[in-house]
Image (tube, rainbow, N blue to C red):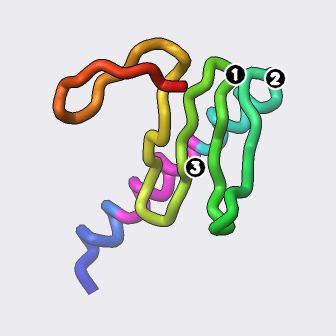
Amino acid sequence: MNTFSLSVMDDLSAARRKVEIYCQSLVEAGSAHWLLNNRGKTELHLEGGEAYLFSEHGLTWLRGSNEVVRHHHGQARSAS
């Protein structure tokens, strides 16, 4: 087995744990809450309206705050 690959995986696991600990601290501070979606996946919802999906591949931004956000085509729209 490639030891470089193991080292990278260890680094990624450590980074993921740090992100999860930070997100949990937001929940404990009352600034966010965890949600189990209808597909059984974990989401973090921040009080400002932002939402993130946690998966085995990483963290995915789902939506922004109630401010104006931009589509990937550059068109402005309301996040609500």
What residue is shown with label 1?
47
Could you tell me how far apart the alpha carbons at marks 3 and 1 are, in whole angstroms? 22 Å
User: Pointer 3: residues within 10 angstroms few (<14), some, or many (20+)?
Assistant: few
Assess whether mark 2 and mark 3 are in contact (beta carbons under 8 angstroms).
no
In the rendered image, residue 46, in percent from the top left (x then y), is placed at 65, 27
Amino acid type shown at disc 3? Arg
What residue is shown with label 2?
30
In the rendered image, residue 59, in percent from the top left (x then y), is placed at 46, 48
Q: Which residue is pictured at 65% across the width and 55% down the height?
A: 42
What residue is shown with label 3?
17
Assess whether mark 1 and mark 2 are in contact (beta carbons under 8 angstroms).
yes
Amino acid type shown at disc 2? Gly
* Nearer to us in this view, 59 or 47: 47
Q: Which residue is pictured at 63% across the width and 33% down the height?
A: 22
Amino acid type shown at disc 1? Glu
Figure quadrant of the C terminus: top right
Question: Closer to the N terminus: mark 3 or mark 2?
Answer: 3
In the image, residue 30 above or below residue 8: above
